[in-house]
Amino acid sequence: MSQKTRFVALVAASALALSMGACTSTPAAPGSAPASSGSAALKDCNVGIAMPTRSLERWINDGEQLQKKLKDAGCTVDLQYADNKVDQQISQIQNQIAGGSKILVIAAIDGTALGPVLQEAAKQSAKVIAYDRLINGTPNVDYYATFDNYKVGQLQGNFLKDQLKLDSAKDPINFEPFAGSPDDNNAKFFFSGAWDVLLPYVQKGTLKVISGKSPKSNDEWASIGIQSWLSDKSQAEMDNRLSSFYTGGKKVQAVLSPNDSLAIGIEASLKAAGYKVGTDWPLITGQDGDKANVKAILAGEQSMTVWKDTRKLGERVFTMIQQISKGEKVEVNDEKSYNNGVKVVPSYLLEPEVVVKDTVQSKLIDSGFLKASDVGL
Ligand code: BGC
């Protein structure tokens, strides 16, 4: 936008704001389209976006979608990816603060490592939105926008419970649980949601964790966490469990995978061990709706994914930024669930949903989240 058009847009925006008088914001239901604060160019909108890694499809989409929306609204945007390296993310945020960012949108790599840099942000009066992952141990996080992380796990747990008919199962079912990265605050919520459903069946013996890698309670989840959510690490772990414990013809029948990147590694391991779809392939859960996993769902190698429409998260954060820039009240829908150790962070939770083979077309393709050609349809 040229200086002149920017000026014209600003004048038009101010005139509109004057003619509308004071705005009030009405809370929207989780998952619904955000109440728009108007699309006129935003004043003083200088945003730093810090994303964890380009190695996962979802973060690329998350960052690029939000950047585009903000640029279209006339904001200055600095989008950075940190290759899953905590120090790199900290220095990127430092640069953003030094470069004049007044709003920081951060998907933390390590949710406990950002206290000092956010102290600097507070000195510059920058507002901080925790994106998808909560930032812990600091008062300097203003809002949190995410999907209901506990519900993600519940959907995975209930999926396994229903598919395996755990309430009426006669024979014990061989089952292996995995958890996400120990430094990601979300991983604990995903695991708790699933474990609250599944642990009673492990305790009753309906589910048998042959490897013994079965946390006794939700608090022990990190003992089976896979650092940095890496597919090659989940593959190595599954290789290890299969070769050490699944001997003498024993077969694993169900796997709790908290997300798609871990599911990819687990599926590669099963293939290498000779498991075949249609004969002895186990049930496997996932999360994100990544292209490779949707292909795996269509091929029968993955049973489901918990889909989080990241476009909705982008819209929500964009609305928060508009509200901050305009000095309006920022709309949230949860003020109790996310205590970061210093305070309860006002949050906006969106609804995740299950996608299985039969709903790939109606949910992922028809909504435009993926193209049919992305997944070989
Ligand atoms: C996100 C998931 C993602 C995982 C790995 C989590 O914090 O909520 O959607 O699969 O990180 O990047």
Image (cartoon, rainbow, N blue to C red):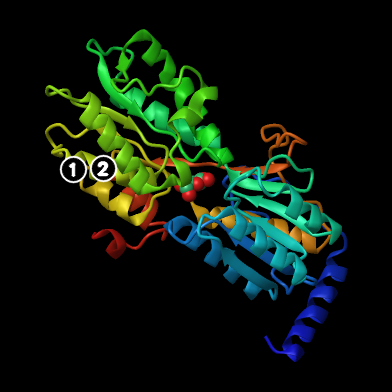
- State the residue in front, 337 or 377: 337
Along the horizontal axis of the image, is 295 left or right of 84?
left
x then y, percent, for residue 183? 56, 41
Q: Is residue 190 above or below residue 227?
A: above
Q: Give the residue displayed 76% in from the left and 43% down from the top.
A: 138
Q: Is residue 189 above or below residue 43?
A: above
Asked if residue 354 shows in the view, the reply is yes
Secondary element type, mark 1:
helix
Q: Residues within 10 Å of mark 1 (few under 14, many from 20)?
A: some
Q: CA distance from mark 1 to mark 2?
A: 6 Å
Q: Which residue is mark 1?
A: 271
Pointer 1 residue Cβ closer than 8 Å to ligand 1: no
Secondary element type, mark 2:
helix
Along the horizontal axis of the image, is 44 left or right of 211?
right
The residue under label 1 is which amino acid type?
A: Lys
- The label number, if any, that marks residue 106 in the structure image: none
Q: Which residue is mark 2?
A: 267
Q: Give the residue displayed 50% in from the left and 34% down from the top.
A: 190
Q: Looking at the image, do the residues carrying marks 1 and 2 touch, with CB atoms under 8 Å apart?
A: yes
Q: Is residue 370 above or below residue 301?
A: below
x then y, percent, for residue 30? 60, 43
The residue under label 2 is which amino acid type?
A: Glu
Asked if residue 307 shows in the view, the reply is no
